[in-house]
Image (tube, grey):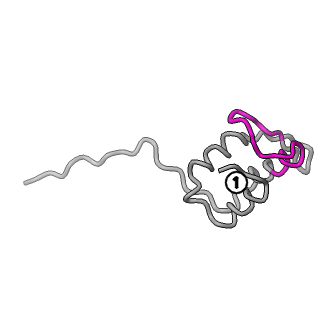
Amino acid sequence: MESSPPARRNRHPRAARRPTGGPPTSHLAAGRQFHTREGHLNVPRKHVEEMTGEGGEVTAVRLGGWLDNTRRRSDRLPADRRAELDALGMRW
């Protein structure tokens, strides 16, 4: 009788994909805030933008890293998201 190979346990299951309205929305808001303040979107890779919420809580958004990753994955970016970043002067 043949035995089947032991089942592999996935120690690090892949995280579920985030819906379109998830964290990238807050990153876009951080990009808009940076653009309004600085007049451009040439953000250093390690830049962290502080966003103030409605209740006054401050949230740190890793804007530079997100923009860098977005540039690298631009071929998979939805057209509407790309248009929003183009409007802010994103350098691809």
Instruction: Pick the residue in front: 11 or 48.
Output: 48
* Quarter of the figure that contains the N terminus: bottom left
As drawn, which residue projects farthest toward the left?
Answer: 1
The residue at 71%/63% (across/down) is 83
Residue range in magenta is 32-50
Residue 11: name its quadrant.
Answer: top left
Residue 9: name its quadrant.
Answer: top left
Residue 82: name its quadrant.
Answer: bottom right
According to the picture, the residue beneath numbered tag 1 turns out to be 24
The residue at 70%/61% (across/down) is 21
Q: Examine the structure image and report whether residue 41 is included in the region drawn in magenta.
A: yes
Find residue 40 and report its horizontal and vertical position in percent.
Answer: 81, 46
Instruction: Pick the residue in front: 88 or 62.
Output: 88
For badge 1, the amino acid type reads Pro
Q: Badge 1: how crowded within 10 Å, few (<14), some, or many (20+)?
A: some
The residue at 24%/46% (across/down) is 6
Q: Does residue 10 lie above or below 22 as drawn?
A: above
The residue at 80%/39% (across/down) is 49
Q: Does residue 53 lie above or below 83 as drawn?
A: above
Q: Secondary structure beneath disc 1? A: helix
As drawn, which residue projects farthest toward the bottom?
Answer: 80
Question: Is residue 64 shown left or right of residue 71?
Answer: right
Find residue 89 and report its horizontal and vertical position in percent.
Answer: 76, 53
Q: Does residue 87 lie above or below 43 as drawn?
A: below
Question: Is residue 54 shown left or right of residue 19?
Answer: right
Q: Examine the structure image and report whether residue 49 is included in the region drawn in magenta.
A: yes
Instruction: Pick the residue in front: 75 or 52.
Output: 75
